[in-house]
């Protein structure tokens, strides 16, 4: 980055800057609007140059009303860091030397056409005639004066060439200084990276030391535990010795007791208790007198010995010896309370399955079941009263849940009826009153949860709430959801299809998560087809992702890429400013790329591939110096689109005109936005590849340098010839001559 720091400067509150010993409008200073001036003495102040008025006057903006007295300053010629600015600087430098080229060529042509021999002959003639007349001496004096003028002119041209050379050296030194600064910065960054690596290594070594210390502590703890276990084992050994002595003592005491027992009072093992005198008394004493085994069965007797539970090879039961029959197990005890199937069904309130009670014609079925509260199956013809719909051959199933105290009336129960068409209805009796009929099944494969509203969804459907909202079978493995008669979604074993907008309010981690890992070219988190269109119509096209922001002057994330527990990888956000304009930022780790609504892009560095291995048919740009004569650098306001509309935005720039570049280097001009940005003539927007312009300027600079080098050689030759001429004139005048370099 080049800087300008000649002289000193001051600034008033209105932003006017006054220079002292400055030449701000001198050629090759490259100071222009947009550059930044810094007052480096206290207080430090920065401002943006808006106009270069003269060598000592500059107008600045964004000064904040600051006043700065005469102090040191620097101007950052930051426009040179862009390709566009660099190209303009090089072009101005070449144009300056081209302006000097005419003067140099005129001097060269003068000396080329200068007849040194003729001058020498004239001098010899003057010398021969000098003694004749004083007028001839006056002519000689005039010749000396003319020669002095030639000398002065040559010295002036030589001094100008020196000045131009010094200017080039100064520019070269500035570039060198900038390169040294960048190298030093890179070196500092490298040192910082090495130090960071060293610090990390020290940290890891300290961690290893800590782990070793922990292992040492664990080993000491294990040693202490082993000592405790050894102490416990010694204690256990002592306890075992004590127990051994106790057992030996008990053994001796048992031997003494056994010697005191009489054998005739003992039961013998080989008799298996047959040597008992009264076995019944023994059974009573052992509380097993109610347990008996006889041939064919095993008995468990009641306390009064009248009833017993018998287990036989063919079954078991509860027998009453007084009644001489088996007693059924009561419902209270978990049985049926009956010895017959019919009695068991009655006791358990189970309807009879092998017959139905017939209802006579003209029967009011609801009144009938109120007055006949018996669970069971019933049937009738079509000539009955109280049915939910007109039909014939009805079947009834009554489940009684409660009766009046005299069991004559139904209080609580459920009545299910089925028609000859297959429709099924139910009615509930609540405290002696029927609640009303509800359809629970339709023979046309329609289920209604809508009361009497009906179902308009058609076959194989369930209507919920009203007649046109619910679920419907849409084919093998397909379930459709309907709202107000229209399909809004369908489910299958492979996917879910929504026929309208899907609105989800996520919870937990505030995201719609897709389980598993996507792999393969056809896999994605979100996939689907979108319609296309022109670039200019991007606002009206469908999109793969639509983010609706909630306000202005705040950045909103569009996407993020992260490896949890490791690092943030990439992301993109956008912001809409209330003052106008918008920006989109793209992040790749710590790198940031900024794109704004004026069409500008910003980053640390844009790099274009330029490897010679990628190039073919190389052809050097010729007559570059002549070509740049057609190019002119401008400052201008540029619109972000070709045809102005409500979305147009202007920005201040400096650069070249694409049509000018196209005349001399069409390879550096590209045609953009062919589908929506055409001008009225049907021509597309033209853009410049400034890498091509830089290549043109480099070759032009080389051509100019070759010319300057050749001219320098000719100047050196002329200087030598002038020196010879001076010696010849001095010899003519017979006086010594001091030569100046």
Image: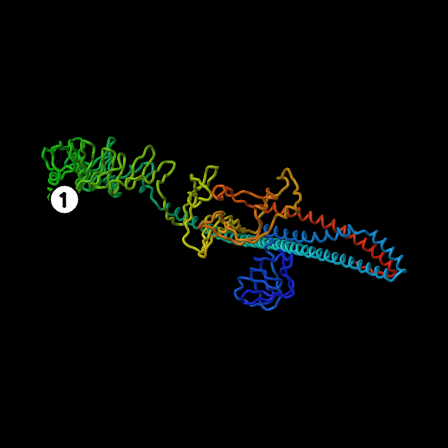
Residue 138 falls in which quadrant of the image? bottom right
Q: Position of residue 101 (x, y in %)?
A: 70, 52
Label 1 sits on residue: 433
Q: Is residue 306 visible?
A: no
Quarter of the image with the N terminus is bottom right
The colour scheme used here is rainbow
Task: Say whether residue 473 is visible.
Answer: yes
Q: Is residue 717 left or right of residue 553?
A: right
Q: Is residue 265 left or right of residue 404?
A: right
Q: Position of residue 212 (x, y in %)?
A: 57, 53
| The residue positioned farthest toward the bottom in the image shown | 69
Q: Looking at the rendering, which quadrant does residue 433 occupy?
A: top left
Crowd rating for badge 1 (residues with CA inside 10 Å; few <14, some 14–19, many 20+): some
Q: Position of residue 132 (x, y in %)?
A: 90, 60
Of 496 and 177, nearer the camera is: 177
Name above or below for residue 563 compared with residue 479: below
Instruction: Name above or below for residue 503 compared with residue 443.
Output: below
- Residue 696 falls left or right of residue 681: right
Residue 56 screen position, x and y as percent: 62, 64
């Amino acid at each position: 980055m080049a800087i300008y720091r000649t002289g000193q400067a001051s600034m008033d509150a209105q932003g006017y800057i006054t220079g002292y010993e400055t030449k701000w409008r001198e050629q090759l200073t490259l100071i222009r609007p947009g550059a930044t001036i810094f007052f480096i003495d206290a207080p430090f102040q920065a401002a943006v140059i808006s106009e270069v008025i003269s060598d000592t006057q500059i107008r600045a903006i964004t000064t904040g009303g600051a006043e700065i007295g005469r102090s040191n300053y620097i101007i950052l010629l930051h426009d040179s860091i862009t390709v566009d600015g660099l190209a303009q600087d090089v072009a101005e430098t070449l144009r300056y030397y081209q302006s000097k080229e005419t003067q140099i060529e005129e001097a060269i042509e003068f000396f080329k056409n200068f007849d040194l021999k003729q001058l020498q002959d004239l001098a010899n003639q003057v010398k021969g005639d000098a003694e004749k007349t004083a007028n001839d001496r006056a002519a000689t004096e005039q010749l000396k004066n003319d020669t002095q003028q030639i000398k002065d002119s040559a010295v002036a041209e030589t001094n100008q060439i020196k000045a131009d050379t010094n200017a080039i050296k100064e520019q070269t030194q500035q570039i060198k200084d900038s390169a040294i600064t960048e190298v030093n910065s890179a070196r500092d960054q490298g040192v910082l990276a090495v130090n960071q690596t060293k610090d990390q290594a020290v940290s890891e070594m300290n961690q290893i030391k800590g782990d070793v210390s922990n292992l040492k502590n664990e080993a000491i703890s294990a040693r202490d535990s082993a000592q405790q276990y050894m102490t416990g084992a010694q204690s256990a050994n002592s306890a075992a010795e004590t127990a051994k002595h106790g057992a030996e003592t008990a053994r001796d005491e048992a031997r003494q007791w056994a010697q005191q027992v009489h054998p005739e009072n003992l039961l013998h093992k080989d008799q298996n208790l047959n040597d008992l005198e009264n076995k019944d008394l023994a059974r009573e004493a052992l509380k097993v007198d109610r347990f008996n085994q006889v041939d064919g069965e095993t008995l468990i007797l009641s306390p009064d010995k009248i009833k017993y539970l018998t287990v036989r090879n063919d079954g078991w039961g509860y027998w009453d010896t007084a009644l001489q029959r088996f007693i059924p197990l009561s419902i209270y005890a978990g049985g049926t309370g009956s010895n017959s199937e019919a009695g068991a069904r009655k006791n358990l309130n189970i309807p009879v399955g092998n017959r139905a009670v017939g209802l006579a014609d003209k029967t009011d079925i609801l009144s009938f079941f109120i007055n006949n509260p018996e669970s069971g199956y019933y049937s009738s013809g079509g000539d009955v009263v109280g049915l939910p719909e007109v039909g014939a051959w009805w079947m009834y199933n009554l489940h009684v849940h409660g009766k009046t105290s005299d069991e004559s009336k139904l209080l609580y129960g459920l009545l299910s009826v089925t028609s000859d068409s297959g429709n099924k209805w139910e009615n509930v009796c609540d405290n002696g009153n029927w609640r009303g009929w509800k359809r629970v099944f339709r023979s046309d494969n329609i289920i209604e949860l809508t009361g009497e509203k009906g179902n308009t969804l058609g076959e194989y459907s369930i209507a919920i709430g009203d007649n046109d909202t619910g679920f419907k079978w849409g084919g093998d493995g397909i379930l459709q959801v309907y709202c107000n008669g229209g399909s809004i979604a369908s489910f299958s074993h492979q996917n879910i299809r929504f026929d309208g907008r899907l609105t989800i309010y996520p919870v937990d981690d505030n995201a719609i998560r897709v389980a598993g890992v996507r792999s393969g070219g056809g896999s994605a988190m979100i996939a689907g087809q979108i319609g296309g269109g022109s670039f200019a119509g991007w606002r009206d096209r469908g999109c793969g992702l639509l983010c609706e922001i909630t306000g202005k002057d705040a950045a909103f994330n569009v996407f993020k890429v992260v490896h949890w527990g490791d690092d943030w990888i990439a992301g993109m956000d956008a912001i809409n400013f209330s003052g106008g304009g918008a920006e989109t930022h793209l992040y790749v780790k710590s790198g940031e790329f900024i794109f704004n609504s004026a069409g500008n892009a910003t980053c640390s560095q844009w790099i274009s591939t330029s490897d010679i291995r990628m190039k073919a048919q190389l052809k050097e740009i010729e007559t570059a110096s002549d070509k740049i004569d057609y190019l002119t650098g401008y400052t201008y306001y540029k619109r972000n689109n070709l045809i102005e509309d409500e979305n147009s935005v202007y920005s201040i720039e400096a650069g070249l005109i694409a049509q000018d570049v196209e005349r001399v280097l069409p390879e550096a001009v590209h045609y953009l936005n062919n589908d929506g940005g055409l001008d009225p003539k049907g021509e597309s927007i033209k853009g410049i590849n400034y890498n091509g312009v830089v290549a043109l300027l480099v070759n032009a600079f080389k051509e100019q340098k070759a010319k300057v080098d050749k001219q320098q050689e000719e100047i050196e030759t002329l200087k030598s010839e002038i020196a010879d001429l001076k010696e010849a004139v001095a010899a003519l005048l017979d006086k010594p001559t001091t030569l100046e370099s």
